[in-house]
Image: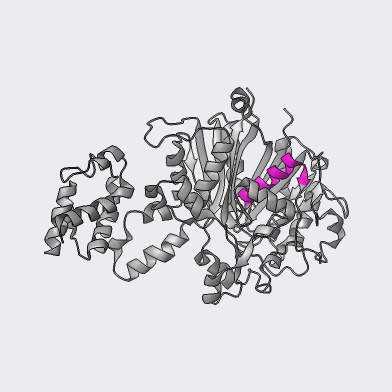
Amino acid sequence: MSRRVVVTGLGVVAPNGTGVPDFEASLRLGRSGIRHVEAMAEAKFACTVAGVPQGVDALVEQEFDEDERLVMNGSHRFASLACLEAWKAAGLERPARDSEEVDWDTGAIIGTGIGGMDTTAEKVVPLTNAGKVRRIGSTSVEQVMASGVSARISGQFALGNQVTTNSSACSTGTEAIAMGTERIRSGAAKRMLCGGSEAATHYIWAGFDAMRVLNRRSNDAPEKASRPLSASAGGFVPGAGAGVVMLESEESALDRGAKIYAEVAGQGINCGGHRMGGSMTAPNPESVRRCIDAALADAGLLAADVDVINGHLTATGADPREIGSWAAALGRGPGELPLITATKSMIGHTLGAAGAIESVASILMLKGGYVHPSINCEDVHPEIEPHASSISHELREFEDMKVIVKAGFGFGDVNACLVFRKWEG
Amino acid sequence: MEQSQVMEGVVKILTPWVKNDEALQAVSLETNILDDLKVNSARLVDVVIAFEDEFDIEIDDEDVDTVNTVGDAVQLISSKLG
């Protein structure tokens, strides 16, 4: 029996596009979704810009009944929209709310890096401190429990297979897709909705601002603020949203004649153990290299087969080290790396959603035969300069692209890597 | 406040949580909130908070346990309003 895993649906809520058509248009144009956020300015953040998805309220109102809207917090709303889009794209029928049918073959791994911080900050803490616990109501537990976001999805689509939430900081979204791939390969599920979601709230971003890892130099030019690969990169720009892919066994997809966007050819997940230069906040370069190698080996591909890299590339001091790891993993010298692009240059760092939104971008590029521009790196970082010719500064048409690799690295020294291959039957 | 006004407020607050629209269309004082309207029992605490806000009253937990039907809610709220 085939154990190949394919992608049969995509859904996205990103700062530069809500829904796949909008998002893809922005990717091709190199359109930034970074904006001034007044709440950050009022709270005296050093960084006052962020990537906040637009047009979400109207879509949520259109797609979900009032009782559902009343119980969803930020990450639930983003994830619900992205899952619904992926579900519809997969050609599946949305189950009736009063139907008793359960889809035992379909599950979900929807991760989040931080979880329901908006609910905690805006409801649980203030009401508890005011001695008004009773007024918290019934909805806070399902919003702050780590698995709340995937639990919400299971009810919306009557999912009867594994439904869980993974959390591995900024590699969460990438890891979710890797884990879902394994679930399908094992034969335990036919379909898995996989991805990540992160709410748009300055309460999540405050701790990062305090760590001085956010870019505080570009508040007056939001669209220029997220600068991966550049000499002027001054930290990452926080972002929010959700990305979801519908993973499906090749057999199931072919049986029902589903549209296939790409194959998930391989995956790798590991941790650097906070050794060899790795720590809670920095990746062990050896573990990054091993993770990429493991994903390629899992795909049965050679380093030479990689056409495009969509890096983690956050616009911090870690970018040069990451490029070094790619060069080491792929055994390429200066000028020899495949094309490199950074979706974060347009959307910022969407934390637990990043790997998932950027996987959606990667699959769109693979299917569409192009590489989106990596904006805001006119001044390539001096340590990356030897590889500068590999950076996709402009939109590049690339019809023959066969393999794109997406990696995500997170606090905790955790890594995940995905290899997407063009679907050619 | 007229009982009909209280009833109107109660139904307005229950409406988003109702899973049986037919029962809502035929709502009366005898309509059972959980059994007929199919409101999720966990949401009753949200409904009670909304009653308190809408009618500017306080409802004790013990009182909540006496509410089964729409009429029970209307009677409880009316008694608090004096």
A178 or A152, nearer to the observer: A152
Seen in the picture, residue A262 relative to A232 is either above or below; the reply is: above
Q: How many marks?
A: 0
Residue B18 x, y percent position in the rendering:
30, 44
Can you give x and y, in whole percent of width and height, for residue A85 in the image? Answer: 56, 42
Q: Is residue A88 visible?
A: yes
Q: Does the magenta run of residues contain A389?
A: no
- Vertical arrangement, residue A349 with respect to residue A264, above or below: below
The residue segment tinted magenta is A355-370
Residue B66 in sight: no
Whether residue B51 sits left or right of residue A256 in the image: it is left
The foreground one among A134 and A256 is A256
Residue under the image location 32 percent in, 54 percent down: A138
Q: Quadrant of residue B35?
A: top left
- Colour scheme employed for the rendering of this structure: one colour
Determine if the magenta segment contains residue A369.
Answer: yes
Q: In the rendering, at what x and y percent does residue A31 appear? A: 70, 58
Identify whether A182 is placed above or below A215: above
Prevalent SS, magenta region: helix
Q: Residue A205 vs residue A95: left or right?
A: right
User: Is residue A140 or residue B1 the one in the foreground?
Assistant: B1
Judge left or right: residue A347 versus residue A198: right
Q: What is the quadrant of the N terminus of chain A in the image? A: top right
Percent x, y for residue B51?
24, 58
Residue A201 higher or lower than B18, as above or below: below
Residue at 22 percent across and 66 percent down: it is B56
